[in-house]
Amino acid sequence: MLPGSMSSRQVVYGVVVGVHALSSVLGFGAIGVSGVSAGALRPPLGPSQLAEARRYFRRRSVPGRTLWLVPVAGYAALALGSSDRSPGQPWVLIGAATWLLAIVLAAQVIWPAEARISTLLEALVEAGGGGDAAPGGSPDVVWRDIGASRQRLVRASAVCDVSFVVASVSMLFRFGHG
């Protein structure tokens, strides 16, 4: 169908589906990048590596926060779409469950771990890049704390990445859809 012959409802539906897809890719992509960045964070870091890690973990992930838009746009797309789609269909429930898992992990594990790593990296800088003393203990203690946060972040982001794949496959193939 040519764009000139589309109804306004079809145009709105297309925009809403686009927002749903874009917010999914941005949100889950940002979480994946955070996991990879945390996975690469290991001592010793040179001055430029430490500066780069501080820059990355200092920011609050706006793209990651787009995860909150995913179900809103998804359910809006269901409401605007054809009448053979309903919120109770298995593919929709799979998508909702995987999103719920991802947002709980993001809010309870990933974003706090990013903030903790940021605080700990600043402690290393205050100690002269890992000098004799750092707030909260020696550089070794700080690195141990960074390692614990890094592991939580990496594991949680991996689970989120798997949930993104499961949700995407479910929605593309519409499991349980007549």
Image (cartoon, rainbow, N blue to C red):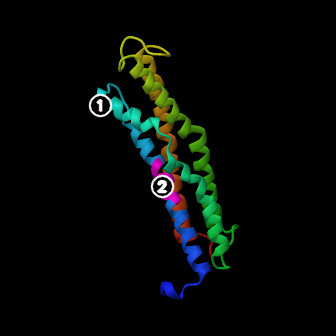
Q: Position of residue 18 (x, y in %)?
A: 52, 67
Look at 46% across and 33% down and name the residue there: 150
SS at badge 2: helix
Look at 52% across and 58% down and name the residue there: 24
Q: From the image, tell me which residue sits under label 2.
A: 26
Q: From the image, tell me which residue sits under label 1.
A: 48
Look at 37% across and 11% down and name the residue there: 132
Q: From the viewer's perspective, is 9 left or right of 39?
A: right
User: Nearest the camera: 133 or 140?
Assistant: 133
Q: From the viewer's perspective, is 89 left or right of 38?
A: right
Look at 59% across and 84% down and name the residue there: 7
Q: Position of residue 107 (x, y in %)?
A: 60, 42
Count the marks.
2
Q: CA distance from mark 2 to mark 1?
A: 27 Å
96 w.r.t. 32: above or below: below
Q: Main secondary structure of the magenta part?
A: helix
Q: Position of residue 90 (x, y in %)?
A: 65, 66
Q: From the viewer's perspective, is 22 left or right of 75?
A: left
Q: Which residues are magenta?
A: 23-30
SS at badge 1: helix
Question: Can see residue 94?
Answer: no
Amino acid type at mark 2: Leu
Q: Residues within 10 Å of mark 2 (few under 14, many from 20)?
A: some
Outermost residue to the top: 132
In magenta stretch: residue 26: yes
163 w.r.t. 89: above or below: above
In magenta stretch: residue 18: no
